[in-house]
Image (tube, grey):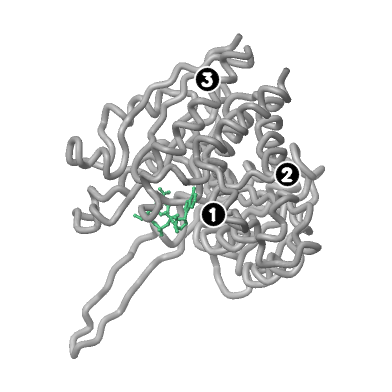
């Protein structure tokens, strides 16, 4: 049985509550002989700040770098709102992304048939939705220099952000998108604003060249980012893999996410470059949602995004595709059977707790893998 090292960072708020369910799911996979997981637990976010004054320690960064994959719950909360910017809970997340060079952020948006009515779109528009967003995560306008607010005198100011991309940054995220498409429906839609932005002209050029040199077997289409936003709410099932830059990806992946209903349902993966000798990528898996301080400690958080993040880890870091498929199937089956946490329930009298939802998914997974 293969053994993998997972580094767990539960974080703040509901993070530890949902992480407990992912950990029990990993343990189950060990018990039934799929793979053995050696897990270590670290501190990130407010929990780390309260313990040692930093949002993540150097020793936990080393453990993150040495693991096969990192699983993170969530960071943040109002009690840390006045902490200095570089020590805020989010700084832990940013350091992980930056130091591990996690440039490709993957967010699947899948519509579970049992939840189709929870979407703001009509059932027929989102039924069978299964798309993957690939957002460039470490470049572009959030990091480009100059970035400043300049005092012009006379009470006037000027704010500057810089959108900047080099060829290799576009190439590596494009490559990740094409490789993913080959394992899915073999189609990539690349979004840019080449009509008004030079970075968009280069983006389109590089993606087109990469496609013709290395991925001609994959269908490629280009869309303007604004038009893609429109298409996402008009006919989202036309997409398979969407790749775009950091800014457009931030906005558009949130739109895609909400097509499926609750935040508590959405997993994500952030991947680095494959190691030239082992082919292994550095990777961080986390739910899209935050620490949900409003429901923390009540045992009612939805653990599906966290367990779904473990499923992505099984697929993209550990090559355990069958276990990943079955974990996602177990989630779908449990939902089809009518189980609901409060965030996705219509009938509040029939809701289950975090632990009950986790246990039901594990029971179904055990059955599917038997
Ligand atoms: P949030 O995602 O924490 O919560 C938004 C709403 O969704 C809340 O009503 C919450 O109860 C609900 N929700 C979220 N996850 C849920 C789940 N698993 N089950 C049931 N309901 C769920 O976003 P927010 O309220 O804007 O932010 C709260 C804190 O989280 C802030 O400090 C913010 O900075 C931080 N945050 C962290 C991350 C992260 O760790 N990646 C992401 C977003 C926000």
Q: Which secondary structure lies at badge 2?
A: helix
Q: Residue 260, relative to residue 1: is it above or below?
A: below
Q: Residues within 10 Å of mark 2 (few under 14, many from 20)?
A: some
Q: Quadrant of residue 36?
A: top right
Q: Which mark is residue 27?
A: 3
171 or 48, nearer to the observer: 48
Where residue 4 sits: x, y (%)?
A: 51, 18
Q: Residue at x 32, y 43 (%)?
A: 92
* Residue 248 on image: x %, y %: 55, 63
Q: Is residue 210 left or right of residue 267?
A: right
Q: Is residue 157 above or below residue 228?
A: below
Q: Residues within 10 Å of mark 3 (few under 14, many from 20)?
A: some
As measured in the structure, the alpha-carbon distance from the residue carrying label 1 to the one carrying label 2 is 16 Å
- Look at 46% across and 16% down and name the residue there: 38
Mark 2 or 3: in front is 2
The disc, 1 or 2, on the residue closer to the chain's N-terminal end is 2
Q: Position of residue 370 (x, y in %)?
A: 73, 17
Can residue 269 be seen here? The reply is no
């Amino acid at each position: 049985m293969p053994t993998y090292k997972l580094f767990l960072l539960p974080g703040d708020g509901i993070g530890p509550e949902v992480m407990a369910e992912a950990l029990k799911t990993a343990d189950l996979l060990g018990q039934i002989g799929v793979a053995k997981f050696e897990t270590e637990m670290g501190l990130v976010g407010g929990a780390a700040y309260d313990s040692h004054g930093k949002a993540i320690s150097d020793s936990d960064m080393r453990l993150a770098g040495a693991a096969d994959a990192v699983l993170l719950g969530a960071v943040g909360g109002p009690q840390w709102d006045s902490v200095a910017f570089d020590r805020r809970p989010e700084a832990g997340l940013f350091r992980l992304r930056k130091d591990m060079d996690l440039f490709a952020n993957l967010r699947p948006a899948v519509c579970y048939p049992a939840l189709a009515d929870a979407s703001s779109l009509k059932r027929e528009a989102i039924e069978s939705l299964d798309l993957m967003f690939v957002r460039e995560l470490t470049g572009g306008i959030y990091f480009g220099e100059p970035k400043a607010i300049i005092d012009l005198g006379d009470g006037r100011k000027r704010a500057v952000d810089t959108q900047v991309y080099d060829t290799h940054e576009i190439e590596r995220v494009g490559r990740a998108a094409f490789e993913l498409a080959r394992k899915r429906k073999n189609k990539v839609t690349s979004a840019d604003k080449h009509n008004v932005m030079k970075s968009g002209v280069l983006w389109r050029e590089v993606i087109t060249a990469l496609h013709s040199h290395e991925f001609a077997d994959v269908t490629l289409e280009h869309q303007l980012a604004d038009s893609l936003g429109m298409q996402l709410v008009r006919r989202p099932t036309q997409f398979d893999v969407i790749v775009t830059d950091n800014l457009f990806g931030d906005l558009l992946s949130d739109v895609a996410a909400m097509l499926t209903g609750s935040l508590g349902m959405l997993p994500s993966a952030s991947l680095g470059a494959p190691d030239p000798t082992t082919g292994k990528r550095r990777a961080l898996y986390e739910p899209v949602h935050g620490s949900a301080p409003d429901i923390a400690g009540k045992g009612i958080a939805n653990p599906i995004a966290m367990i779904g993040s473990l499923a992505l880890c099984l697929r993209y870091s550990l090559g355990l595709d069958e276990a990943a498929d079955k974990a996602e199937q177990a989630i779908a089956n449990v939902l089809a059977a009518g189980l609901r946490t409060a965030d996705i329930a219509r009938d509040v009298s029939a809701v289950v707790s975090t632990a009950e939802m986790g246990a039901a998914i594990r029971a179904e997974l055990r059955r599917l893998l038997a």
